[in-house]
Every structure is written in structure tokens, then in C-alpha cells.
Image: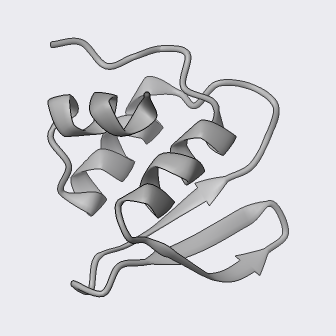
Amino acid sequence: MKLPSDVRPQNLLKALKRNGYLEVNKVGSHIHLHHPDCHRTQVAIHPKPIAKGTLKAILNQTEFNLEEFKKLLK
């Protein structure tokens, strides 16, 4: 499966929060998120879609597979 190319930071943030991630800190335009299972990531909030490489890195940090992630985006 291919990574979606039109994921906006706000949608990614909502999907992560639906999966149990909590917003713990905000520094400038970056929001830091932690999960009770000790996974951590950060999302930069800006108006453009997230780059594919950045999205892939976030998915690796959160240990999501692509199918789970697409379900959370809906």
C-alpha cells in the first residue's frame, strides 16, 4: 500500500489522539505526543500536507501499520 499524500497535520493529530496519544507539550508549531505504552512523536502544525518521508517516520515512531492508520484517518 502507498502512503497517502494529502494528510494534513490537523488530521494526523486527531488520528493519533483517537488511538490514545496525549498532547503533553507544545513548542512553537510542534506538538509533542506521548502514548501510555511509552511511544513518543511530534507533529509540526502548518497549512500544507505532511511530506511522505515525515509521515513514514511518524508511523514508524508510533508503530502503526498503514491499514490501521488509514482506518484512524476516517
Rendered view: 5 above or below 42: above
The x, y position of residue 52, in whole percent, is 43, 25
**Left or right: 38 in relation to 72:** left
Which quarter of the rendering shows the C terminus? Answer: top left
> Which residue is at a point 29% across and 32% down the rendered structure image?
71
List x then y, in percent, for residue 41: 44, 67
Frontmost residue, 35 versus 31: 35
Residue closest to the eye, 70 or 3: 70
Residue drawn at x 53%, y 43% as measured from the top left:
12
- Residue 17 vertical placement versus 6 (above, below): below
> On the picture, is 57 further left or further right than 22?
left
x, y percent for residue 55 = 42, 37
Task: Look at 37% across and 51% down and name the residue there.
Answer: 58
Examine the image and state in which quarter residue 11 appears: top right
* 2 w.r.t. 72: above or below: above
Whole-percent x, y for residue 37 in the image: 21, 84
Way the structure is coloured: one colour
Give the quadrant of the N terminus. top left
